[in-house]
Image: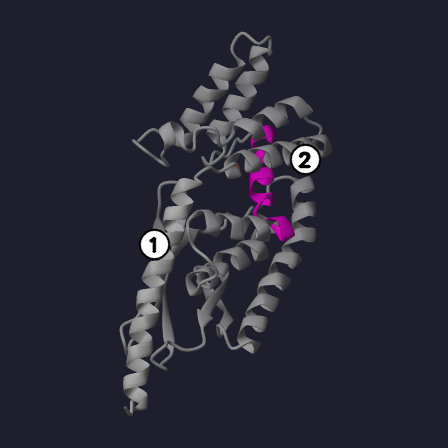
Amino acid sequence: MNINDSTNNRVLAAIELELQEQIIKEEFEHIQKNKHSNSLWGHSERVAITAERLGLGEGLDPTVCRLAGLFHDAGKFCGGSYHKGDKPEEKRSVEVLRKLTRGKGIATNLVDQVEESILQLYRQDPDQTLLTKVLYDADNLDKLGLLGIANYFVKIGLRGSGLSSSVLHKATVELTYARHAPDCLTTETGREIARKRAPKTITFFRQLLDSLREDGLFDFRIKEVVFNNLLLDVVTPALCKCGHQFSQKISEVPGIKCSEIHLAHICHSCQSNYELRFCRPRLIE
Ligand SMILES: [Fe+2]
Ligand SMILES: [Zn+2]
């Protein structure tokens, strides 16, 4: 029997597809059986430690900083789901804080300060307390530097994704945040840490993309794009699978918690497209 190349390729592609379905299905069944995650708890602990450190630099009571860090995300998966109902997660976090501190002899005024900081966290009040600023910086520092990179990949894994092209597209957000981080944090102590960590994020993603390109796995480039007075580091494939170039369409849309940047990569030849949404970094003037 003489099978020509194109038949061969078609047969291989069909086998690959069948194998892909099977591997994804079986891995999913395996994950379902071993389901547990301490990722949010780990984040809460780290934010508490960082908040204490920032608080010391800013002259705040470490206990109040620690409590703010521990409880700031406590309402995130309320009832086992993310963003269920229309009650904001901060309100639920505060309910957990009240419930767990009640009758334990913690000064009410201390709990009040923590409550205020959690409620203020993602409101753009002009009159944020120093504790809110410390909490905001501690939360954001968890995404920066080598720790931030490790957290980025853990989060992607928890959402069921491996190292794929969509993960590389999302590096746009990591790079753009890292570039602006020192100007987005709200305390001098936080900015100082950001200035040390941000270059590590940037170097890592540049080197990762270079190495994937050299290895012939993915060819993604970083393009600096100015949009609405903001410099973005857009990570995009050099070419679409069909061989044509992608063009980018960027817009800014008001979201629930922030002003959202919508970034679309569109191939006008084969209509492939990839969309990414993220909060515009909030620069402190
Ligand atoms: Fe957080
Ligand atoms: Zn295409």
Q: Is mark 1 within 8 Å of ligand 2?
A: no
The amino acid type found where label 1 is placed reads Lys
The amino acid type found where label 2 is placed reads Leu
Q: Residue at x 56, y 38 (%)?
A: 43
Q: Main secondary structure of the magenta part?
A: helix
| SS at mark 1 in the image | helix
Specify the quadrant that holds the N terminus: bottom left
Q: Residue 262, can we see it?
A: no
Q: Earlier in the sequence, mark 2 or mark 1?
A: 1
Q: Is residue 97 magenta?
A: no
Q: Residue 125 location in percent, x, y?
A: 47, 33
Q: Residue 50, can we see it?
A: yes
Picture quarter containing residue 175? bottom right
Read off the residue under disc 1. 25
Read off the residue under disc 2. 54
Q: Is residue 19 left or right of residue 112?
A: left
